[in-house]
């Protein structure tokens, strides 16, 4: 008999992936230009020119074994040093290359860290809404996901989160800019959360950890993203270049453990051990070297802004209710009927593929991923208008 839990996960894909696969088949039937696929957060803006330039330079100048052979398990030391230098210079936070672990994107960062820090029954508090795979990653690591509310605009509120922290809480996991709401947590909100965690950690043998999942850090529309290590010493940053550099398929990111974290060296050993146990060692070597020269850069955020403004302006004009995203590339829209899945089924009749919010920890919304060509949004607007007219 095979692992029943894994069979279930394999057969019951996430709402996002299920919709994406549906889109692939639907496009074969009616033509790709007639399907408005807003399911997957797949960057639709090309990587900045520096990525191609650095890739070409490396392929031209470096020996093959330095680009395609194994690196050490946590990554190439010079790359880890470049990441540490960037964190120190850009954010004013202390960082040691020996506490940086290169990973295969943010999902690997999350699964490694969760397996490194959780024991059976430990709880991870996550403000809603959140990326649905958090539940899978936490439960597979032996933990329990605890959903904490945010305010009516999905902003982080420490007073709302406080009742969900107890003796079993091992970590709080935040994502800002947020998928799916587009909210960017402020300095004040992070400071208040940090103070709460210090208070709740008092008297504990091991403090509560703050895990910051940051694949969208550079994708903002004027909002500043606070760096958690400057506010709370027991922090880890889980970063990915998938969105900022439009390298989703290259699977490259990193884990950074704050040197001020309780037992930082032992924690990093646990990170290395979890990476070993999960088989997440030696992240793609070529792209380790590429991203070391592209730290802090991003794809053309202005193109995402244009998509956001067009979609938000049109949808609110048609009667949809949503908050203006401050970052990332998602619009979180209130469903015009209580049954969000029923609304998404009706949207499909107009070839609009929207993700229901149920698995994001809140009900009554849909996520629209607007990292698509601008022309797709333009062509989709009559369908959005017709869909809303059915509810009038």
Image (tube, rainbow, N blue to C red):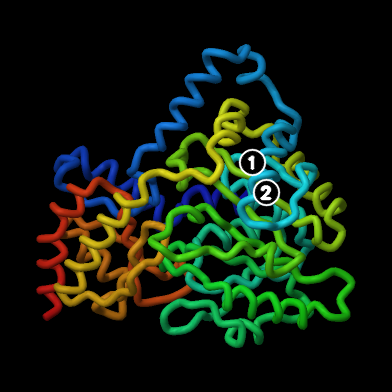
**Looking at this view, is 246 or 88 the one in front?**
88
Disc 1 is placed on an element classified as strand
Q: Position of residue 83 (x, y in %)?
A: 66, 43
Residue in view at x 10 percent, y 61 percent: 382
Q: Residue 260, located in which quarter of the rendered image?
A: bottom right
Relative to 69, does residue 8 appear above or below in the rendering? below
Are the two marked residues, 1 and 2, in contact with CB atoms closer than 8 angstroms? yes
Residue annotated with mark 2: 255
Q: Is residue 13 left or right of residue 114?
A: left
Precedes in sequence: disc 1 or disc 2 = 1
Q: How many marks?
A: 2
Q: Which residue is mark 1?
A: 103
- The quadrant of the image that shows the C terminus is bottom left
Compared across the picture, whether 313 is left or right of 288 comes to left
Quadrant position of residue 100: top right
**The N terminus: image quadrant:** top right
- Residue at 35% in and 77% down: 364
Residue in the image at 64% along x and 80% along y: 192
Spatial separation of the CA atoms under disc 1 and disc 2: 7 Å
- How many other residues sit within 10 Å of disc 1, few (<14), some (14-19) or many (≥20)? many
Rendering coords of residue 49 (x, y %): 40, 32
The crowd level at tag 2 (other Cα within 10 Å; few <14, some 14-19, many 20+) is: many
Q: In the visual, does 169 lie left or right of 153?
A: right
């Amino acid at each position: 008999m095979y692992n029943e839990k894994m069979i279930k996960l394999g057969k019951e894909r996430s709402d996002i992936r299920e919709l994406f696969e549906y889109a692939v088949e639907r496009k074969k039937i009616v033509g790709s230009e007639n399907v408005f696929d807003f399911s997957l957060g797949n960057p639709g803006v090309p990587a900045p020119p520096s990525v191609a330039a650095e890739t070409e330079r490396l392929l031209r100048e470096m020996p093959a074994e330095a680009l395609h052979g194994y690196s050490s398990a946590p990554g190439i030391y010079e790359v880890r040093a470049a990441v540490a230098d960037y964190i120190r210079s850009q954010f004013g936070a202390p960082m040691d290359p020996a506490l940086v672990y290169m990973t295969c994107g943010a999902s690997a960062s999350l699964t490694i860290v969760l397996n490194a820090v959780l024991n059976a029954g430990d709880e991870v508090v996550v403000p809603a809404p959140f990326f649905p795979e958090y539940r899978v990653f936490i439960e597979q690591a032996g933990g329990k996901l605890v959903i904490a509310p945010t305010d009516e605009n999905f902003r982080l509120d420490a007073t709302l989160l406080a009742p969900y922290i107890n003796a079993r809480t091992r970590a709080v996991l935040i994502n800002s800019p947020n998928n799916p709401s587009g909210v960017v947590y402020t300095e004040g909100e992070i400071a208040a959360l940090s103070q709460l965690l210090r208070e709740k950690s008092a008297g504990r043998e091991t403090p509560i950890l703050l895990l910051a999942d940051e694949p969208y850090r550079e994708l903002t529309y004027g909002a500043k993203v606070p760096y958690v290590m400057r506010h709370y010493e027991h922090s880890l940053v889980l970063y990915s270049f998938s969105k900022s550099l439009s390298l989703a398929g290259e699977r490259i990111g990193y884990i950074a453990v704050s040197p001020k974290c309780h037992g930082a060296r032992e924690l990093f050993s646990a990170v290395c051990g979890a990476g070993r146990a999960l088989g997440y060692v030696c992240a793609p070597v070529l792209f380790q070297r590429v991203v070391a020269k592209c730290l802090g850069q991003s794809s053309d955020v202005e193109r995402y802004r244009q998509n956001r403004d067009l979609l938000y302006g049109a949808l609110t004009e048609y009667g949809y209710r949503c908050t203006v995203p401050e970052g990332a590339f998602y619009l979180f829209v209130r469903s015009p009927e209580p049954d969000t899945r029923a609304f998404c089924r009706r949207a499909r009749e107009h070839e609009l593929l929207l993700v229901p919010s149920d698995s994001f920890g809140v009900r009554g919304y849909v996520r629209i991923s607007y990292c698509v060509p601008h022309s797709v949004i333009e062509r989709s607007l009559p369908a959005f208008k017709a869909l809303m007219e059915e509810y009038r």
